[in-house]
Image: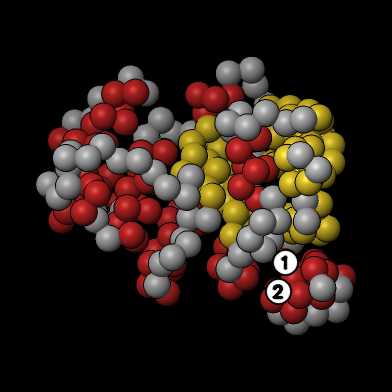
Amino acid sequence: MTKLISANHLTKCYKARCVVNHINFDIEEDEIVALIGSNGAGKTTTISMLLGIVPQDSGTIEYWKSDFKKEIGTQLQSTPFFEGYTVEDNIKLFAAFYGISLSSNEMDEKLAAFDLLQVKKVSAIKLSLGQQKRLAIIVSTLHNPKLIILDEPSAGLDPRGQKEIQQIIRGLKEQGVTVLFSSHDMLEVMNIADRILMIHQGCIIANGSPSYLMEKYQTHHLEDLFFELTK
């Protein structure tokens, strides 16, 4: 399988505190990878370095091609939609950034796929949190990326909203998109992740499929594994 990202000894420190401390990992095509850890473990900083938002202090990040930025989509914890513009208008604006033009039928098909067709004329900032999360994934996949990176995509959602996001992520993989997402929801991770990168105090302490890691550490639940390795 093709390695899309290879991070080697990736490090980021703020004053005396190393938020990310010499971590190594790969992201391969056609997999859903969960970056898990408690708040402050280094998940968001790691994602920010992969996206080039925050420069690493040391280490390297190798990508599968030189113009990789054209084939990466991202949803951060907060997506700034354009105030005063409808859902449909926001999609058109983001599409224009990618040089994409959507027909009315294409627009409706995309909105219907994310259960947003009925609110396409509603101001984007007036949507529920779950609807905003789904809209954020739409705009981050308009250019048909090979890799999408999601920072806690279901944070703050109720169980129904969480399930909808999980179904979307599985659907992206079925379409050939590799997904890296961060989370501290162990049930969500168990439901959809092919592989786990567990980060604790800036270090990756486990890397493997949920079933492999639970068997390796003799635990029956992912939460038990997390508590065992981070105690």
Task: Inspect the image, locate mark 2, and give the three-letter code of the amino acid beneath it.
Answer: Leu
Place of residue 218 in the rendered image (x, y in percent of width and height, measured from the top left): 85, 79
**What quarter of the picture does the N terminus occupy?**
top right
Residue of label 2: 222
Q: Residue furthest bottom?
A: 220
x 87%, y 70%: residue: 216
Could you tell me which secondary element the residue under label 1 belongs to? helix
The residue shown at (37%, 35%) is 142
Q: Quadrant of residue 101?
A: top left
Label 1 neighbourhood size at 10 Å, few (<14), some (14-19), many (20+)?
many
Q: Position of residue 115 (x, y in %)?
A: 26, 57
Question: Is residue 217 in view from this perspective?
Answer: yes
Upstream in sequence: badge 2 or badge 1? 1
Q: Residue at x 84, y 37 (%)?
A: 9
Which part of the image, by quadrant, shows the C terminus? bottom right
- Nearer the observer, disc 2 or disc 1? 2
- The one nearer the camera, 177 or 48, is 48
Q: Residue furthest left?
A: 121
Q: CA distance from mark 2 to mark 1?
A: 7 Å
Tag 2–tag 1 contact (CB < 8 Å): yes
Disc count in the image? 2
Locate residue 188, reporting x and y percent. 56, 68
Which image quarter: residue 7?
top right
Badge 2 marks a residue whose secondary structure is helix
Residue 81 lies, with reference to residue 157, above or below; the image says above
Please state if 188 lies on the left or on the right of 142 as rendered.
right
Q: Is residue 177 visible?
A: no
Q: Is residue 112 left or right of residue 34?
A: left
Label 1 belongs to which residue? 210
- What colour scheme governs how the chains and residues are painted in the rendered image of this protein? secondary structure
Position of residue 122 relative to residue 200, above or below, is above
